[in-house]
Amino acid sequence: MPAATRAAPKHGTVRVLSPSALHSSLEAMVVAHRERGGTEVALAFETAPALVARLAGGELVDIVIAPPKVMDELFASGRANPEGAFQVGRVGVGIVVREGAPLPDISSSEALTSSLLAADAVIHTRASSGIYVAQLLERLGLAAVLRAKTITYHDAQGAFTRLATGTGKEIGFGGITEIRRWANRGLRLAGPLPPDIQNYTAYVAALTADPPNREGAGVFFRFLASADARAICSAHGVVV
């Protein structure tokens, strides 16, 4: 095991704030870090747009993960440290339906358009993937047509709960990694967006400007950048 991934037990908890697209990957990394003797790590998840507000409101965090544009805003405001920041990976947008519902035809952007027009409801979040989906619907000329049956939620928890408890022909969108987490909770991944309209959100990790647990955060931060961590990300659907 590389020396950079080893850690003696430390007092205090490392606090990480991240979009939920990396939820499963980070949970697995925390387990692996603990097995290496690392300190405890507490994970908190938030949509990228709301993440900035939480930090601006004074939330104490050691490590923050965010899309590049959001991270640039955190660097500019002095809330995150650009030194050593790195890209964790990328997550594409997937199409999700209720378990047992007919799979929509999403073989092309044209087929997806027809499926959305025939759906009873179109569901997405106001997180990074949802922002892209809203822009995509505008680009495809569907936003106005679908407005009456488009339902948006703050995050995947709300959107996917609504989708899993629906009774009609509903189609949802979300990060592929998040959809996979709901595989045994009433949802099914229909597939990724067609290649010509797919979008990948990148996620960058950085230490905050003044980590409360600087030593423990430094150790976990180095682990996040390791080959072992990249393998964990890849196993959970993150493109590294």
Image: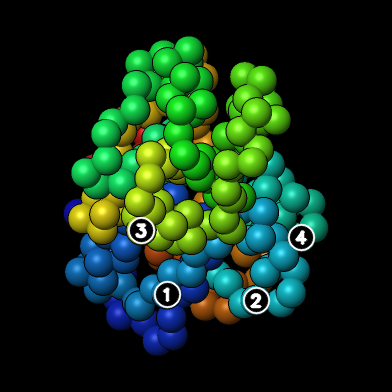
The percent position of residue 94, horizontal first and vertical second, equals 40, 35
Bin the neighbour count of mark 3 within 10 Å (Cα to Cα): few under 14, some 14-19, many 20 and up.
Answer: few
Q: Which residue is mark 3?
A: 165
Q: Which residue is mark 4?
A: 78
Which mark sits nearer the N-terminus, 1 or 4?
1
How far apart are the two marked residues, 1 and 4, measured between alpha carbons? 23 Å
Which mark sits nearer the N-terminus, 3 or 4?
4
The percent position of residue 113, horizontal first and vertical second, equals 50, 20
Asked which secondary structure carries label 4, the reply is: loop
Asked which secondary structure carries label 1, the reply is: strand
Mark linked to residue 59: 2
Number of numbered discs visible in the structure rendering:
4
Instruction: Verify CB contact (< 8 Å) between mark 3 and mark 4.
Output: no
Instruction: Verify CB contact (< 8 Å) between mark 3 and mark 1.
Output: no
**Which residue does the image show at 27% across and 40% down from the upper left?**
101
How far apart are the two marked residues, 2 and 4, measured between alpha carbons? 14 Å
**Which numbered mark, 3 or 1, is in the foreground of this view?**
3
How far apart are the two marked residues, 3 and 1, measured between alpha carbons? 30 Å
- Say above or below: 4 vs 109: below
Q: Amino acid at mark 2?
A: Glu
Given residues 28 and 208, the one toward you in this image is: 28
The percent position of residue 195, horizontal first and vertical second, equals 43, 17
Mark linked to residue 240: none
**Which residue does the image show at 35% across and 16% down from the upper left?**
107
How far apart are the two marked residues, 3 and 4, measured between alpha carbons? 42 Å
**Which residue does the image show at 45% across and 34% down from the upper left?**
119
Q: Is residue 35 left or right of residue 163?
A: left
How far apart are the two marked residues, 1 and 2, measured between alpha carbons? 13 Å
Mark linked to residue 42: 1
Q: Amino acid at mark 4?
A: Gly
Which mark sits nearer the N-terminus, 3 or 1?
1
Q: Amino acid at mark 3?
A: Thr
